Image (cartoon, grey):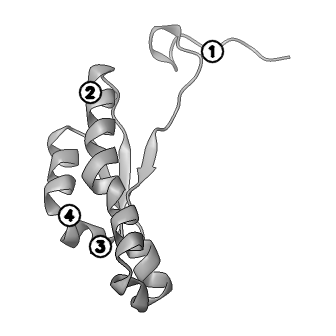
Amino acid sequence: MREPASDGFWPEKVTAAAAVTFDVDAESAIIGFSASNADRLSLMTHQAYGPRTAVPRLLRLLGERSITATFFVPGYTAERWPDTIKAIRDAGHEIGHHG
């Protein structure tokens, strides 16, 4: 039988927590698979959707709900999309590296 959360552990008797994380791989995933993919415009454009379109939308939605998240970003993506990474940071989110 489960016991209710103690008053000393969870703030305001909250009984659950969630970690909100996003991987912002951008083009790094397909280039890492095969460098020749860099010459495939359709793939590169598809992979750019995350930093170009999805991240700004996510930042807006998270901000409207006062939710902070962790965005995991490969080094290549951070170098290729510095303004996107700065926007994540400036919105108060955590940035983690993954490769």
The residue under label 2 is: 63
Q: Of callouts 3 and 1, which one flags the residue occurring earlier in the amino acid sequence?
A: 1
Q: Which numbered circle lies on residue 5? A: 1
Residue toward you, 57 or 90: 57
For label 4, the residue is 81
Which of the two labelled residues, at mark 2 and mark 1, occupies the earlier sequence position? 1
- Nearer to us in this view, 71 or 13: 71
Asked whether residue 90 appears in the rendered view, the answer is yes
Judged by depth in the image, the label closer to the viewer, 3 or 1, is 3
Mark 3–mark 1 CB contact (< 8 Å): no
Q: Along the polypeptide, which appears first: circle 4 or circle 2?
A: 2
Q: CA distance from mark 4 to mark 3?
A: 10 Å
**Callout 1: SS:** loop
Q: Is residue 9 left or right of residue 72?
A: right
Q: Helix, strand, or loop for circle 2?
A: helix
The amino acid sitting under disc 4 is Trp
Alpha carbon separation for disc pair 3 and 1: 40 Å
Location of residue 96 by image quarter? bottom left
Q: Amino acid at mark 3?
A: Gly
Mark 3 highlights which residue?
75
